[in-house]
């Protein structure tokens, strides 16, 4: 069996220094830090020395006069001073002490912590509406048909498109659960580094043939689809893990903005040996793990391997349930599942838009909170969540769970969903970000309050989430750097990238036309598979 883990070359860790700042907002996060290696500790906290840039040399940026919601929920006009890549001072008039600093006028604006998209897929940028109107099982075939065999250039282009869309709507950090050949995924990391967004790439890997992942015997598949090698054959799990480790070792970001996680696609799509090896490496190295969990009725009704009561127990048996794990969707979890996840310190990612668009169900967010699990928010891919607009994701999370909840005290609020979209995601990624506080990473998003909808409301956060039709950020700061100014990215020619997208999609669709025919040939069969799945619980219990 291959070795569990080999650390990066010493040259790549030579600049790593002890850390000095850490957010301790959950029991799970504390356990994760205790287990993390020096490699991962550089990712999860703000390092000293070279990675905190220019502090000793006096590089400063000030944001003047914006409205800021403090930890007590008070909305006040304030200045924010950034020193290097951390927030150094907050308060009315504090920018006056730094007359020579670069200044950003935020008067008439709302300043938020940079938003964190905790689950998305950049490959989806060239197939936004493919498979529309279908449940996950047939939809997956169209997603595969539109993205299989992508070139390195296409991987970079889709990451650029994703970063543009994310930054323009105030997202400063994202988790890209990236499908396709792992060896090409360095191109996505390059794109994110060049544009300036924080990103963690989690190569989406699996080693179980498709029929086994949805409980269909080989002989029951349509004859034309039964022996389609690209679908039924999977690379060896060890090869996929080794490729992910190579990506982790080789990608070194001096700014600390980019990193690599493990991204097993889901427990149904990975062999026990693959899960066990990923878990062992994660425990030893501190590398984080991200996966899908119980997204659809089909997944929830699929029998677990012999000796396990369910797929969560399979993951637990192989050591995956730790504070280093985050899981997306989680629609069909039981109450006992939630208790286990809370005890293990796992973070759950809520994806309300894609759960609705694919008809997967409505996750019980109130039950998650009641169980005490850590929660983050994500848009999912553009081909199933519609967009990467995290303000829109907050709107869905705010409103979706109100029907059936008799006690309005249990409803989500603008502040609670903002927490999911900032601190929740930052905690999942292990970042000292997601809040505006002295010592936190300088990731900020500034939204103009000049729309007419803000004239009649005293709560600009609620208005932004519930009423505003334009979620474009005026200014975005990542790691102390100005990456969006006056609504435009500062490090890339957006028009050039967007101009390349249409031609890239045409080439990709032409190249993969036989795969699209294959997806259409089995669409009805997979619709019937999804319809036959038993529902293990009601969609939305009434309380």
Image (cartoon, rainbow, N blue to C red):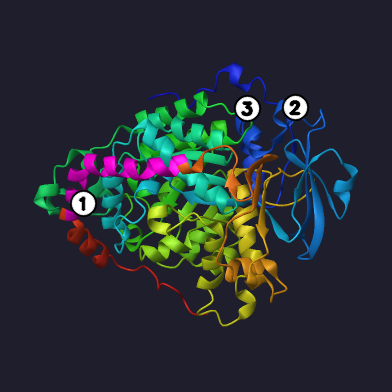
**Residue 317, located in which quarter of the rendered image?**
top left
Q: Position of residue 298 (x, y in %)?
A: 31, 60
Per the image, label 3 sits on a secondary structure element best described as loop
Q: Residue furthest right?
A: 97
Q: Residue furthest left?
A: 223
Residue at mark 1: 519
Question: What secondary structure is the magenta-colored segment mainly?
Answer: helix
Per the image, label 1 sits on a secondary structure element best described as helix
**Label 2 to label 1: alpha-carbon separation:** 52 Å
> Which class describes the residues within 10 Å of circle 3: few (<14), some (14-19), or many (20+)?
some
- Is 222 inside the magenta-drawn segment? no
Q: How many marks?
A: 3
Which callout, 1 or 3, points at the residue further toward the start of the chain?
3
- Measured along the vertical axis of the image, is residue 438 above or below residue 309? above
Q: Are marks 3 and 2 in contact (CB under 8 Å)?
A: no
At a point 59% along the width and 29% down the height, the residue shown is: 253
- Measured along the vertical axis of the image, is residue 525 above or below residue 285? below
Q: Which mark is residue 254?
A: 3
Write the start and end of the magenta stretch as one range.
496-520
**Looking at the image, can residue 263 be seen?**
no
> Which class describes the residues within 10 Å of circle 2: few (<14), some (14-19), or many (20+)?
some
Q: Pick the residue in front: 153 or 123.
A: 153
Horizontal side, residue 203 vs residue 511: left or right: right
Residue at mark 2: 49
> Which class describes the residues within 10 Å of circle 1: few (<14), some (14-19), or many (20+)?
many
**Label 1 to label 3: alpha-carbon separation:** 43 Å
């Amino acid at each position: 069996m291959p070795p569990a883990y080999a650390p990066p070359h010493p040259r790549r860790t030579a600049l790593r220094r002890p850390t000095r700042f850490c957010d301790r907002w959950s029991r799970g996060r504390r356990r994760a830090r205790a287990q993390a290696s020096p490699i991962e500790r550089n990712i999860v906290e703000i390092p000293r020395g070279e990675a905190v840039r220019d502090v000793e040399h006096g590089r400063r940026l000030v944001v003047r006069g914006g409205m800021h919601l403090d930890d007590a929920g008070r909305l006040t006009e304030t200045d924010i001073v950034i020193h290097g890549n951390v927030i150094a001072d907050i308060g009315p008039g504090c920018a006056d002490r730094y007359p020579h600093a670069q200044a950003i006028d935020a008067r008439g604006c709302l300043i938020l912590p940079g938003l964190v998209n905790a689950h998305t897929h950049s490959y989806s940028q060239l197939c936004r509406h493919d498979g529309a109107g279908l449940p996950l099982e047939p939809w997956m075939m169209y997603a595969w048909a539109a993205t299989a065999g992508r070139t390195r250039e296409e991987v970079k282009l889709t990451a650029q498109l994703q970063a543009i869309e994310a930054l323009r709507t105030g997202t400063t950090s994202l988790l890209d659960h990236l499908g396709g050949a792992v060896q090409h995924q360095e191109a996505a990391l390059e794109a994110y580094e060049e544009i300036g967004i924080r990103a963690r790439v989690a190569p989406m890997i699996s080693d179980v043939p498709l029929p086994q992942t949805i409980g269909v015997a080989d002989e029951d598949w349509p004859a034309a689809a039964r022996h389609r090698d690209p679908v039924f054959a999977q690379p060896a799990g060890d090869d996929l893990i080794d490729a992910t480790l190579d990506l982790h070792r080789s990608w070194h970001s001096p700014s600390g903005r980019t990193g690599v996680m493990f991204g097993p696609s889901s427990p149904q799509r990975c062999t026990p040996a693959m899960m066990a090896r990923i878990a062992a490496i994660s425990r030893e190295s501190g590398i984080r793990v991200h996966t899908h969990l119980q997204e659809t009725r089909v997944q929830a009704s699929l029998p677990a391997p012999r000796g396990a009561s369910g797929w969560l127990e399979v993951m637990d048996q192989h050591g995956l349930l730790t504070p280093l794990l985050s899981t997306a969707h989680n629609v069909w979890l039981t109450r006992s599942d939630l208790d286990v996840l809370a005890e293990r310190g796992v973070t759950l990612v809520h994806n309300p838009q894609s759960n609705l668009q694919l008809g997967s169900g409505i996750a019980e967010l109130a039950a998650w909170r009641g169980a005490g699990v850590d929660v983050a928010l994500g848009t999912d891919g553009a081909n199933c969540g519609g967009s990467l607009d995290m303000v829109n994701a907050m709107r869905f999370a705010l409103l979706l769970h109100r029907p059936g909840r008799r006690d309005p005290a249990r409803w989500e609020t603008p502040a609670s969903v903002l927490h999911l979209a900032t601190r929740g995601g930052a905690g999942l990624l292990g970042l000292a970000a997601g809040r505006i506080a002295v010592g936190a990473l300088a990731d900020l998003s500034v939204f103009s309050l000049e729309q007419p909808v803000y004239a009649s409301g005293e709560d600009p956060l609620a208005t932004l989430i519930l009423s505003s039709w334009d979620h474009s950020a005026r200014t975005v700061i990542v790691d102390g750097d100005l990456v969006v100014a006056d609504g435009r990215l500062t490090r890339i020619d957006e028009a050039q990238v967007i101009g390349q997208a249409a031609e890239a999609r045409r080439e990709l669709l032409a190249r993969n036309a036989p795969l699209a025919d294959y997806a259409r040939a089995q669409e009805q069969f997979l619709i019937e598979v999804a319809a036959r799945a038993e529902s293990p619980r009601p969609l939305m219990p009434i309380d």
